[in-house]
Image (cartoon, rainbow, N blue to C red):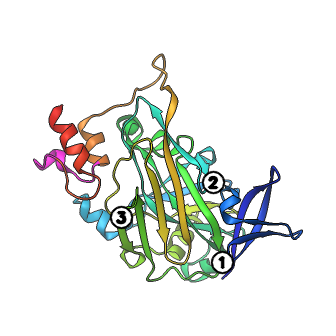
């Protein structure tokens, strides 16, 4: 396995190779990992994400998987890197983490079988598919603002080649507390299936990113929280939540909402319809008291 990263080296975007605790540029320059200013490891033309894939997430939402995967799209302007700030806009409160694994395309890919798809994958990275559920009432179909607002797609720290996605542990840790903990064995559709499915009608080109789903216990985070997604063999992606400097404009468009549907989704279950006041699990306790005050 080889790990490549993209960093700002003397102010210029540069691809580097990891060598222990150092990152090495093609011209021989070296910088320690702790000193590096990380960018996302690739420049995609598109970011495509699967809806439900992990069994624990399906069970949490008390639903069942469709016969085949469904997907949504994140704008490339949502992309950011390791140690970047993730912005929760002022006036919003339902920003959820979703620890995921990113598939990175390495060759132009169209109309391939699952058995062939692996040859078109450059490698894998760690991702966090943040969701701004305040806009779920208006964008639940497209997920455009829910999942596509600026900074809501951290990917990194690197791109790892020749990584076997089978039987790997994925965790999301908030302020040192493990919130999500699962295995890729929970996935209904594996990485090769996802690539082949999308490439039936959409040409994938080098650098494109496909996000492969999140396990149970996605919950809201607050400004000041430090969120790390750790994937066995791929490393750790860390970001800090910050408050946006300005509120969402009120003179145009739908406004952030705290409706029953928004709360149900953000807190991890269909509790609105089942008489459950709030779901249990990591990260829910703060919101139980908040809801009781409403």
Quadrant location of the C terminus? top left
Mark pair 2, 1: CA separation? 20 Å
Tell me where residue 70 sits by quadrant.
bottom left
Q: Please give the residue where the numbered disc 3 appears in the rendered image.
A: 180
For this rendering, which residue is in front, 51 or 5?
Answer: 5
Q: Is residue 241 left or right of residue 260?
A: right
Mark pair 2, 3: CA separation? 26 Å
Q: Residue 26 appears at what percent x and percent y?
A: 86, 70
As drawn, 225 above or below 256: below
Q: What secondary structure is marked by label 2? A: loop
Tell me where residue 56 sits by quadrant.
bottom left
Q: What secondary structure is marked by label 3? A: strand
Q: Nearer the viewer, mark 2 or mark 1?
A: 1
**Can you see residue 206?**
no
Q: Residue 33 appears at what percent x and percent y?
A: 68, 65
Q: Please give the residue where the numbered disc 2 appears in the rendered image.
A: 46
Q: Residue 197 appears at what percent x and percent y?
A: 52, 68
Q: Please give the residue where the numbered disc 1 appears in the rendered image.
A: 161
Mark pair 1, 3: CA separation? 25 Å
Q: Which residues are magenta?
A: 267-277
Q: Is residue 232 left or right of residue 51?
A: right
């Amino acid at each position: 396995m080889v790990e490549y990263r993209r960093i700002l080296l003397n102010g210029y975007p540069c691809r580097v190779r990891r060598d222990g605790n150092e990152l090495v540029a093609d011209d021989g320059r070296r910088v320690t990992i702790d000193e590096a200013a990380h960018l996302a490891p690739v420049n995609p033309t598109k970011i495509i994400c699967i809806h439900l894939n992990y069994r624990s997430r399906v069970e949490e939402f008390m639903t069942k998987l469709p016969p085949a995967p469904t997907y949504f799209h994140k704008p490339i302007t949502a992309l950011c890197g390791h140690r970047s700030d993730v912005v929760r806009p002022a006036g919003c409160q339902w920003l959820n983490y979703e620890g995921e694994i990113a598939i990175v395309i390495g060759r132009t890919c169209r109309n391939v079988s699952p058995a062939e798809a692996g040859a078109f994958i450059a490698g894998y990275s760690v991702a966090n598919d943040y969701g701004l559920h305040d806009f779920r009432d208006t964008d639940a179909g497209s997920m455009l603002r829910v999942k596509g607002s600026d900074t809501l797609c951290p990917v990194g720290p690197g791109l790892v080649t020749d990584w076997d996605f089978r039987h790997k542990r994925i965790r999301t840790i908030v302020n040192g507390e493990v919130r999500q903990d699962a295995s890729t064995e929970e996935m209904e559709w594996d990485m090769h299936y996802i690539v082949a499915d999308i490439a039936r009608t959409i040409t994938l080109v080098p650098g494109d990113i496909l996000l492969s789903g999140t396990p149970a216990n996605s919950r809201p985070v607050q400004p000041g929280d430090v969120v790390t997604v750790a994937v066995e063999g791929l490393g750790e992606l860390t970001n800090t939540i910050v408050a946006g400097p300005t509120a969402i404009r009120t003179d145009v468009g739908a406004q952030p909402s705290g409706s029953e549907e928004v709360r149900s989704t953000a807190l991890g279950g269909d509790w609105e319809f089942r008489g459950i006041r709030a779901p249990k699990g990591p990260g829910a306790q703060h919101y139980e008291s908040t809801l009781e005050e409403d």
